[in-house]
Image (cartoon, rainbow, N blue to C red):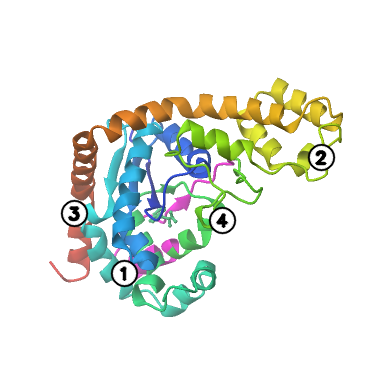
C-alpha cells in the first residue's frame, strides 16, 4: 500500500523550545510510520522577517536540525531537509506568484498581526507579503496530501488550497489540495502562564542545560495568593500546575492539587516533582543532542542526503509544471 505523503516545516527563527517539542515535533515523530513524511527547516521563510540578521538564521537552522533528530525524527524513515538546499521551491514560488491575487495575501490575518508585533522591522516587503505563496510551494511541490500544523496555521493552508485549485483550473490538474492534519496537542504554557513563545521570553529551550531548566522552573510564578506555605492555593491559577498536567502522572497531579488546596505542601515541593518529570522527559533528548553537537559531519550528511532525496521529488513535479506552463 502506498502511504499518503505528509509534509511539515518549521521556520528557522529561534531555538526549539518545549512548546515546539510537545506541540509539533512529537506529533511528527508519531506520524513517521503511517505516512511518507517530509519534514524541513524553512530558512527562506525566516528571511522574510529576519533578513537583517542572516547569521541568526544559520544558527537557528542548525539548532532545529539537531533537535529534529534528537526528538526522534529518523532520517531512515522520513525525508528531513533544508528549504534552501532544494531550490525548486523558489522556482515554483515564482511561478505561483503569477497566479496569486494580491487580495488573497493581504487578507491573511498573520500578515497584519506580524507587522504590528514586529513594528521595529520593516516588513513592507514583497517577500513578506508572499510568505504564504512560498509556503504553498513547499507543500504542493511534493504533492503532499496532509499537513500537520497548529490551528494558527489554518489560514495559510486555506490559501494553499486556493492557489492549488487555481493552478489546476488554469493549466492542468497537477496538485492535490492539501489538507490539515489537526491533532489535539496540549498547548504548553510558558514560565509566566502565557503560551510558551520566544517572543515572550518565557520558554524552556531544548538547548538549556539541566541547571538552567531547574532554575527556570524553581523561579516560576505560582498562585499569587500563596504568599506563605501556610496559605492555601488554587492550582488552576499556577502555571506550574499546567505544566504538571503535561509532564506528571495522575497520582502526582492529585498529590499536588490536594497539597496546594490544603497547604499540605509548599510550592517548592510541587516544583521539584515537576523538575524531576521534565528532566525524565528531556534526558534522552539531551543525550542525543550532545552526540550530534560533537558530530557536525553527521548532521551535515543528514541534511544533504535528505535534501537530495527531496529535490528528486520536487524536480519531478517541476518538470510537469514547466510543461503545462509552456516553459519546457
Ligand atoms: N509557517 C511555518 C512556521 O511558522 C513554517 C512553514 C513553512 C511550513 N512552510 C511550511 C509549515 C509548509 C507547514 C508546511 O513554522
Residue 131, image x, y percentages: 39, 66
Q: Nearer the viewer, residue 148 or 216?
A: 216
Say which label, 3 or 1, has the lower sequence index.
1
Image mark count? 4
What residue range appears in magenta?
Answer: 160-185
- Mark 3 in CB contact with mark 2 (< 8 angstroms): no
Give the CA separation, mark 2 to mark 4.
Answer: 24 Å
Q: Is residue 142 visible?
A: no
Secondary structure of the residue carrying numbered label 4:
helix
> What residue is disc 3 on?
315
Say which label, 4 or 3, has the lower sequence index.
4
Q: Residue at position x 12%, y 66% from top?
A: 328
Q: Is residue 204 magenta?
A: no
> What residue is disc 4 on?
200
Q: Residue furthest front?
A: 228
> What residue is disc 1 on?
96
Quarter assignment of residue 152: bottom right
Give the CA separation, mark 3 to mark 1.
Answer: 16 Å
Amino acid at each position: 500500500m502506498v502511504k499518503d505523503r505528509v509534509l511539515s516545516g518549521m521556520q528557522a527563527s529561534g531555538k526549539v523550545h518545549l512548546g515546539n517539542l510537545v506541540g509539533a515535533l512529537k506529533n511528527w515523530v508519531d506520524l513517521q510510520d503511517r505516512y511518507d513524511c517530509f519534514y524541513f527547516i524553512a530558512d527562506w521563510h525566516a528571511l522574510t522577517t529576519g533578513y537583517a540578521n542572516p547569521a541568526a538564521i544559520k544558527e537557528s537552522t542548525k539548532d532545529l536540525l539537531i533537535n529534529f533528530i534528537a526528538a526522534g525524527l529518523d532520517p531512515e524513515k522520513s525525508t528531513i531537509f533544508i528549504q534552501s538546499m532544494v531550490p525548486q521551491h523558489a522556482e515554483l514560488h515564482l511561478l505561483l506568484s503569477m497566479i496569486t491575487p494580491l487580495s488573497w495575501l493581504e487578507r491573511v490575518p498573520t500578515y497584519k498581526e506580524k507587522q504590528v508585533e514586529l513594528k521595529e522591522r520593516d516588513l513592507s516587503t514583497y517577500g513578506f507579503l508572499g510568505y504564504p505563496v512560498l509556503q504553498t510551494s513547499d507543500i504542493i511541490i511534493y504533492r503532499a496530501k496532509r499537513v500537520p500544523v497548529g490551528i494558527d496555521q489554518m489560514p495559510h493552508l486555506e490559501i494553499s488550497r486556493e492557489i492549488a485549485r487555481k493552478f489546476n483550473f488554469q493549466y492542468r490538474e497537477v496538485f492535490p489540495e492539501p489538507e490539515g492534519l489537526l491533532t489535539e496537542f496540549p498547548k504548553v504554557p510558558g514560565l509566566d502562564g502565557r503560551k510558551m513563545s520566544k517572543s515572550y521570553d518565557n520558554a524552556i529551550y531544548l538547548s538549556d542545560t539541566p541547571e538552567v531548566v531547574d532554575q527556570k522552573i524553581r523561579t516560576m510564578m505560582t498562585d499569587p495568593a500563596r504568599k506563605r506555605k501556610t496559605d492555601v492555593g488554587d492550582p488552576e491559577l499556577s502555571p506550574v500546575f499546567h505544566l504538571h498536567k503535561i509532564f506528571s502522572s495522575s497520582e502526582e497531579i492529585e498529590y499536588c492539587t490536594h497539597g496546594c488546596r490544603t497547604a499540605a505542601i509548599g510550592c517548592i515541593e510541587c516544583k521539584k516533582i515537576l523538575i524531576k518529570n521534565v528532566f525524565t522527559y528531556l534526558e534522552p533528548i539531551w543525550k542525543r543532542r550532545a552526540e550530534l553537537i560533537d558530530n557536525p559531519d553527521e548532521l551535515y550528511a543528514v541534511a544533504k542526503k535528505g535534501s537530495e532525496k527531496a529535490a528528486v521529488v520536487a524536480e519531478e513535479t517541476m518538470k510537469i509544471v514547466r510543461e503545462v506552463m509552456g516553459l519546457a
